Amino acid sequence: MLGSDLVKFDIRGDERGSLVAVEGGNDVPFDIARVYYVFGTVEGVSRGFHAHRNLRQVAIAVQGSCTMLLDDGHDRRSVHLDDPSVGLHIGPMTWREMHDFTPDCVLLVLANQPYDESDYIRVYEEFTAAIETLAR
Ligand code: T46
């Protein structure tokens, strides 16, 4: 699917445990301008339901798990995130929904731009219309 890929990070493990280091421009394909994390998600709650016009992000379930549904306007797929050494790169113009959070889930997100509400498309019909316009 265009606009989303899994990224595997090296685990710097030793007898003390494990460590993953993520460098912008190296381990993720952009400079990191913002980091946020989603945690304490109430049971049964889903999040997301939007696309971004320009934003690129990598999401990592550093604890617990959730399922990311991705939609590029043509195809949909679900990616289960449950490995702190795996990131999901989500490019621009990709509708995303997050489901099935485990109570302990901590979803870490690295973004290439600061928060900007005007970059969001929060209505699905507006998203598909924008995809069609881009295809013309
Ligand atoms: C995304 C998925 C994976 C901020 O003030 N700054 C921020 O950097 C972010 C991300 C959010 N907010 C505020 C905006 C809302 O008042 O935090 C509140 C919750 O944000 P939102 O409803 O957009 O959260 P999610 O979990 O639906 O989506 C978030 C990201 O917004 C989004 O970019 O791709 O996680």
Image (cartoon, grey):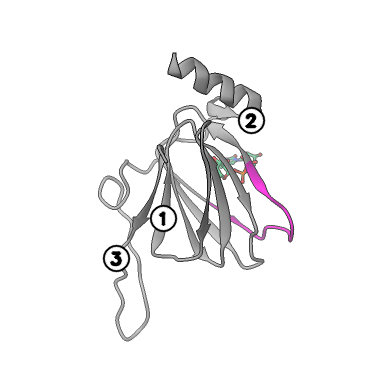
- The answer to whether residue 74 is left or right of residue 98 is left
Residue assigned mark 3:
10
User: Is residue 79 placed above or below 10 in the rendered structure?
Assistant: above
Amino acid type of the residue tagged 2 in the rendering: Arg
Q: Looking at the image, is 46 positioned above or below residue 2?
A: below
Query: Circle 2 — which element?
Result: loop
Ligand 1 picture quarter = top right
| Residue ID for mark 2 | 122
The percent position of residue 77, horizontal first and vertical second, equals 52, 47
Q: Residue at x 37, y 80 (%)?
A: 17
Badge number at residue 98: none
Spot occupied by residue 103 in the image (x, y as percentages of width and height): 67, 66
First in sequence, mark 2 or 3: give its number: 3
* Residue 38 is inside the magenta segment: yes
Which of the pair 52/12 is nearer the observer?
52
Q: Is residue 45 magenta?
A: yes
Residue 125 x/y as whole percent: 65, 24
Question: Which three-letter amino acid code belongs to the residue tagged 1?
Answer: Gly
Return the disc, 2 or 1, that comes first in the chain's sequence. 1
Q: Secondary structure under badge 3?
A: loop
| CB contact under 8 Å: marks 1 and 3 | no
As measured in the structure, the alpha-carbon distance from the residue carrying label 2 to the one carrying label 3 is 35 Å
Q: Position of residue 64 (x, y in %)?
A: 56, 67
For marks 1 and 3 on the same chain, the one whose residue lies earlier in the sequence: 3
The magenta segment is 37-48
Looking at the image, which residue sits at the far front?
A: 75
Residue lying at the far top in this picture: please name it. 136
Q: In the image, what residue type sits under mark 3? A: Asp
Horizontal arrangement in the rendering, residue 55 relative to residue 23 (left or right) = right
Residue where numbered disc 1 is placed: 87
29 and 17: which one is in front?
29
